Amino acid sequence: MPIQPLSPGTTRFLTQSPLKLLIGGEWVAAASGETFTSYNPSDGTRLADLAAAGPEDVDRAVAAARQAFEAGWGTLPPAQRESLMRRLGDLITAHASELAELESLDNGKPIHHTRAIDSRVAARQVYHFAGWPSKIAGRTPSVSIPNHFVYTRREPLGVVAIIIPWNYPLIHTMQKLSPALACGNTVVFKPAQLASLAVLRLGELIQEAGFPPGVVNVITGRGSVIGAALAAHPGINKIQVTGSTAVGRSVVQASAGNLKRLALELGSKAPNIIFADADLEAAVPGAFKAGFGNTGQSCVAGARLFVQRPVFDEVVARLVEMTRTVKIGHALDPETELGPIVDEVQTEAILNYIKSGLEQGAQLVCGGRRMLAGDYAQGFYIEPTIFTGVRDEMVVACEEIFGPVLPVFPFDTEDEVIARANATDYGLAAGIWTRDVARAHRVSAAIKAGVVWVNTYDLFDPAVPFGGFKGSGYGRDNGEEVIELYTEVKSVWVSLK
């Protein structure tokens, strides 16, 4: 596996191990002194030790965020918040290659992806929301009570806690942090234990951009400890979470005592539908990318592929051929298309799902094994796996696997596939491939999901809201909708008598 050398900035950052917490503008050790180790899933090597925060550190971070909010961040003139955010966007752009390396080292995403997409999208998120501070406004409702002037104000919530998973740390961080800051909130940020490095480097860039101390605090460690403490903390006004449905439920339960605001983007088992009239030259590669992109470790992965019966065999054959030619390897190899699984625990979980599919009678068309030969032996690699003969009630058809496992189902009619696509507790995303414009709109309207892609897949823009239906959560990231969710509305009545 030809691996490019790390940039000097990445090397410098890693040599700071053990990496500390960012609280109140200072880099500090965890109160307990405990640390944990980050490993490279591509080859098992140690990357760095990181501070393992506990409840006392959560208290310190919340207090620092509250102090920064009360000290004037929430009332800072919009132009000043915009200037700081644009400065941060410039710094992310300048250090994009370094940030991409840290993410690829930490979670195994191929370097060509983190350089071309993740680091650039992170900067784009900041630039987009940097334009919002001067555009957050209330309105003047027309009331039926004479001699009164009424207006509304949009005000920041206060202290916001943000919790993200390990699969897209750069994008998730700036997707959530940018609108929170634009609206005048201060933040306590919790990256995933398995992928914190790029977020800690962003913390350094936030300081370099000139944000006041305490406006952004970054605490690393176990999600079960920090997440529970943040959810229950009375000093937090809102929690914005991307994670599994199980994580979402735990946050809801822990936050019930103080009724804080919640926005949850949770699990998925997205249906991806190929109709017989689809352009297969686009649909098959699109379905492959939807199912196996980021090695299937994506919340919107097209994890249930429905193919209309006349083209079913052809689509499956083409997909199998793609699994034979796709380049699997070290995340820092520029030629790698599919990287490793994030760690041993997730690897074993995926292998158990594959075993379940076999035991329940699904037909393994290709893949299904952990790759252990040669360079693969030190990392966590699983072959792209395709099942057919899958019944809708099988575990591999119902549960979110978060790995390179794709069940493919034949269907006959439009009504049938809509019913089957919606027969899930999830509702985050879906895909449709067809040349029939009317069908595209009919099925898009009928699918119960927060985003539907037609003749494309996995596209996002900071101007377009994103979030789920049903068990995939509530609230939205991106779009004008996220601005509404990071602010409170106040009505002011003025007597004109």
Image (tube, grey):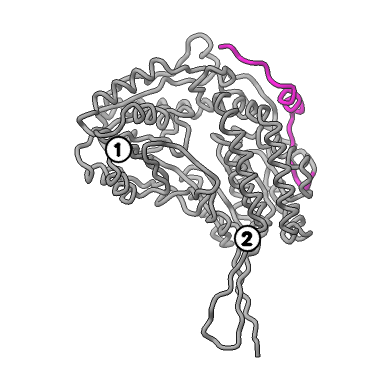
Q: Between 84 and 239, which is closer to the camera in this rendering?
A: 84
116 to the left or right of 16: left
Query: Percent position (x, y) of residue 333?
Result: 57, 17
Q: Between 304 and 439, which is closer to the camera in this rendering?
A: 439
Q: Is residue 374 above or below residue 369?
A: above
Residue beneath the point at 63% across and 76% down: 492
Q: Which mark is residue 217?
A: none
Query: Percent position (x, y) of residue 429?
Result: 41, 43
Q: Is residue 32 visible?
A: no
**Number of numbered discs visible in the structure rendering:** 2
Single out the residue that lies furthest toward the bottom. 497
Asked if residue 19 lies in the magenta stretch, the reply is yes
Residue beneath the point at 68% across and 41% down: 89
Identity, as a three-letter code, of the amino acid under mark 1? Thr
Choose top left, top right, bottom left or bottom right for residue 352.
Answer: top left
Give the mark nearest the N terminus, 1 or 2.
Answer: 2
Q: Which mark is residue 434?
A: 1
Identity, as a three-letter code, of the amino acid under mark 2? Ile
Q: Which residues are magenta?
A: 1-25
- Disc 2 target residue: 136
Query: Percent position (x, y) of residue 115?
Result: 60, 28
Residue beneath the point at 41% across and 51% down: 469
Choose top left, top right, bottom left or bottom right for residue 310.
Answer: top left
From the image, give the main secondary structure of the stretch colored magenta. loop
Q: Residues within 10 Å of mark 1 (few under 14, many from 20)?
A: some
Q: Secondary structure at mark 2?
A: loop
| Figure quadrant of the N terminus | top right
Q: Is residue 55 visible?
A: yes
| Figure quadrant of the C terminus | bottom right
Query: Percent position (x, y) of residue 161?
Result: 63, 51
